[in-house]
Image: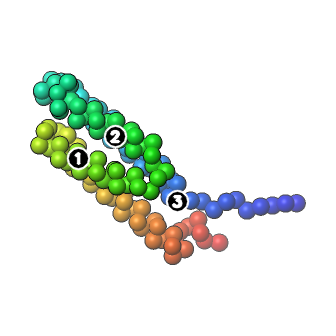
Amino acid sequence: MNESAPPPKDPMRSFRGVMAGTLLLEAIVVALALPLVAKLGDGVGTGQGLLVLGLVVALLVACALLRYRWVIGVIVAIQLVMVAGLLAMTALGVIGVLFLLVWGYLFWLRRDVAKRMAEGRLPSQQQ
């Protein structure tokens, strides 16, 4: 009987799923700032509204490009733009700071998993 071992699990593939979920959640939260821009801000057709719409599109595009290594730099750049959005709209800056903390934690976890994977200490690597 030909019994082949299952392929080894790739923890980074799971991490891309976490990143995709976080980007989608962030896009939804940022899109929910549009009614705030319409009521309390200058309006959706102004710079504030275009900034929010641009960030939503950028987050969704980054989600589609997660298979590339360089997208991490794009995600960090989007977060910095959101934090800088504090000058245009306080709520957007606060959202940016919160998600910057989330992404910092996720990147720390990614680094820890990569270190453990290199050392062979992951549970999936144990015999």
The residue beneath circle 3 is 11
- Three-letter code, disc 1: Val
Q: Is residue 38 above or below residue 60?
A: above
Residue beneath label 2, please?
Answer: 58
Amino acid found under the numbered disc labelled 2: Ala
Q: Earlier in the sequence, mark 1 or mark 2?
A: 2
- Label 2: element kind: helix
* First in residue order: circle 3 vs circle 2: 3
**What's the residue type where badge 3 is placed?**
Pro
Q: Residue at x 23, y 46 (%)?
A: 81
Dot 1 and dot 2 residues touching (CB under 8 Å): yes
Residue 35 visible in the displayed image: yes
Q: CA distance from mark 3 to mark 2?
A: 26 Å
Residue at mark 1:
81
Image location (x, y in percent) of residue 12: 50, 58
SS of the residue at dot 3?
helix
Q: Dividing the picture into quarters, in which one does residue 47 lie?
A: top left
- Tell me residue 123's x, y (percent): 56, 67
Does 67 sit left or right of 83 as displayed? right
- Mark 2 crowd level (few <14, some 14–19, many ≥20, 10 Å Cα): some
Distance CA(mark 3)–CA(mark 1): 29 Å
Q: Which mark is residue 118?
A: none
Asked if disc 3 and disc 2 are in contact, CB closer than 8 Å, the reply is: no
Residue at left 42%, top 67%?
A: 112
The N terminus, quarter of image: bottom right
Task: Name the secondary structure under disc 1.
Answer: helix
Tell me which residue sits at (36%, 60%) in the image: 107
The answer for how far apart the CA atoms under marks 1 and 2 are is 11 Å
Q: Nearer the viewer, mark 3 or mark 2?
A: 2
The C terminus - image quarter = bottom right
Q: Nearer the viewer, residue 44 or 98?
A: 44
Is residue 16 among the parts visible in the rendering?
A: no
